[in-house]
Image (tube, grey):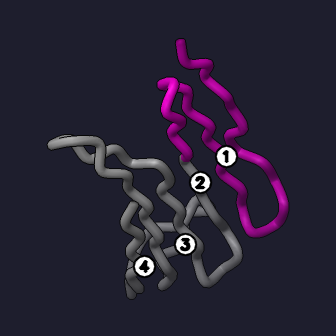
Amino acid sequence: MSATTTHFTLERATCGRTVEGDHRLDQDEDGDERRRLSDERYYACGCWALLHEFHDGGVSRRVMRHDGKVLIDELIAGH
């Protein structure tokens, strides 16, 4: 499993503001294939977005605005 965190300087947050923040990506190496396990973005304004993929193919996605409003909260079941 490999994890990388990068800092970005100008990206549009979920609230529409253009701000800096951090991007964290965790991947799993499965043979010759790399699977994204989690993709997380944290914005300086307080917004964040998370995407988690599970080994069974399921996906969980949450997007939160800096004022606490949940924009997306979904779980898609795998097989």
Instruction: Look at 75% across and 69% down and name the residue there.
Output: 66
Disc 4 + disc 3, Cβ < 8 Å:
no
Most foreground residue, 23 or 37? 37
Instruction: Look at 59% across and 57% down and name the residue there.
Output: 49
Could you say where residue 38 lies in the image, as x and y percent from the top left?
A: 50, 53
Could you say where residue 74 lies in the image, as x and y percent from the top left?
A: 68, 31
Most foreground residue, 52 or 32? 32
In this view, the mark in front (4 or 3)? 4
User: Mark 4: which secondary structure?
Assistant: strand
Disc 2 + disc 1, Cβ < 8 Å:
yes
Q: Amino acid at mark 2?
A: Leu
State which tag comes first along the sequence, 2 or 4: 4
In this view, the mark in front (1 or 4)? 4
User: Mark 1: which secondary structure?
Assistant: strand
- Which dot marks residue 62? 1
- Which dot marks residue 31? none
Q: Amino acid at mark 3?
A: Arg
Which quarter of the rendered picture does the N terminus lie within? bottom left
Report how far apart the C-alphas of labels 4 and 3 lie in the structure: 21 Å
Residue under pointer 4: 5
State which tag comes first along the sequence, 1 or 3: 3
In this view, the mark in front (1 or 3)? 1
Q: Is residue 78 magenta?
A: yes
Report how far apart the C-alphas of labels 2 and 4 lie in the structure: 14 Å
In this view, the mark in front (2 or 4)? 4
Disc 2 + disc 3, Cβ < 8 Å:
no
Q: Amino acid at mark 4?
A: Thr
State the extent of the magenta-drawn residues as a range.
52-79
Report how far apart the C-alphas of labels 2 and 1 lie in the structure: 5 Å
